[in-house]
Image (cartoon, grey):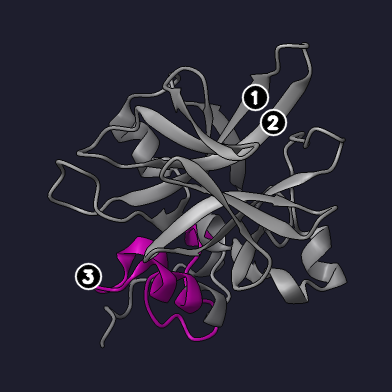
């Protein structure tokens, strides 16, 4: 599989690049046909920067450096534990969910239930901090931009299975929301929203033993863009 060359001669200042030998492009600019996992691995191999410097690390072997590169954006579980994005395979879907650092469990909503992954899952890290080199990772309300604009800057993280009545598989993005229990207790969650025919209108979250659906204007999406 070949990649287009001489596209990164601007180096790190050009928004990323492959700094070792200015080999080619990062992220979605690589040859069409690469899977999301392939792109993530290539970005890590060539130490891509800009909006391609996030890394997915195995949940069961997080180092102290990995943990210092994990950002919870102020989202907490019911008992105050920090929540981070995680992902893992469920029934052929590269699904996105929440990692509870107090339990070392990745909770992923699938169908109407919640799956608990204690291994074979990854946690998102962002080496170098949320802002670096003129590029920043941030959460943006799903109603702040049009769906097409949001898809352009959202951080791709998963690949959802076939959606009923849809003919294509969609890219999954990291979504955040807050629930309020009947007793007024605030509970945050991290889940997924997928690109369904160019729309990001419903997000899926693990909440207790069940999956909760949240409509647009009620969730945030992780994005990365130039400052």
Magenta stretch: dominant secondary structure = loop
Q: Where residue 31 sits: x, y (%)?
A: 25, 74
Magenta-colored stretch includes residue 18: yes
Mark 1 neighbour class, 10 Å CA radius: few under 14, some 14 to 19, many 20 or more: some
User: What span is colored magenta in the figure?
Assistant: 13-42
Is the Cβ of the residue at disc 2 closer than 8 Å to that at disc 1? Answer: yes
**SS class, disc 1:** strand
Question: How far apart are the alpha carbons under marks 3 and 2?
Answer: 36 Å
User: Which one is in front in this view, the residue at disc 3 or the one at disc 2?
Assistant: 2
Question: How far apart are the alpha carbons under marks 3 and 1?
Answer: 36 Å
Say which residue label 1 marks. 178
Say which residue label 2 marks. 188
Q: Is residue 223 visible?
A: no
Q: Is residue 91 above or below residue 120?
A: above
**SS class, disc 3:** loop
User: Which one is in front in this view, the residue at disc 3 or the one at disc 1?
Assistant: 1
Mark 3 neighbour class, 10 Å CA radius: few under 14, some 14 to 19, many 20 or more: few
Is the Cβ of the residue at disc 3 closer than 8 Å to that at disc 1? Answer: no
Mark drawn on residue 32: 3
Q: State the residue at coordinates (86%, 35%).
A: 79
Q: State the residue at coordinates (31%, 71%).
A: 30
Q: Judge by depth and name the residue closer to the eye, 51 or 195.
A: 195
Q: State the residue at coordinates (60%, 73%).
A: 120
Q: Mark 2 or mark 1, which has the lower sequence index?
A: 1
Q: Is residue 89 above or below residue 72?
A: below
Magenta-colored stretch includes residue 144: no
Q: Judge by depth and name the residue closer to the eye, 193 or 27.
A: 193
Q: Is residue 145 above or below residue 203?
A: above
Mark 2 neighbour class, 10 Å CA radius: few under 14, some 14 to 19, many 20 or more: many
Q: Is residue 154 visible?
A: yes
Q: Where residue 186 sits: x, y (%)?
A: 75, 21
Q: Where residue 210 sits: x, y (%)?
A: 55, 37
């Amino acid at each position: 599989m070949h990649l287009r060359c001489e596209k990164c001669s601007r180096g790190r200042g050009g928004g990323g690049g492959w700094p070792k030998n200015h080999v080619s492009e990062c992220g979605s600019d690589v040859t069409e046909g690469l899977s999301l996992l392939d792109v993530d691995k290539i970005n890590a191999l060539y130490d891509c920067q800009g909006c391609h410097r996030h890394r997915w690390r195995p949940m069961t072997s997080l180092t102290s450096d990995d943990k210092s590169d994990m950002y919870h954006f102020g989202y907490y579980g019911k008992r105050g534990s920090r929540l981070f994005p995680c992902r893992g395979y469920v029934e052929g879907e590269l699904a996105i969910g929440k990692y509870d650092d107090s339990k070392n469990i990745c909770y992923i909503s699938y169908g109407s239930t919640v799956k608990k992954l204690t291994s074979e899952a990854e946690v998102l890290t962002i080496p170098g901090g949320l802002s670096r080199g003129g590029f920043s990772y941030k959460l943006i309300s799903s109603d702040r931009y049009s769906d097409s604009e949001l898809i352009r800057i959202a951080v791709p993280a998963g690949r959802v299975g076939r959606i009923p009545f849809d003919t294509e598989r969609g890219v999954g993005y990291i979504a955040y929301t807050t629930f309020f229990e009947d007793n007024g207790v605030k509970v945050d969650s991290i889940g997924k929203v997928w690109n369904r025919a160019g729309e990001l209108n419903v997000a899926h979250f693990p909440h207790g033993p069940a999956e909760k659906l949240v409509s647009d204007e009620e969730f945030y999406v992780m994005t990365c863009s130039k400052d």
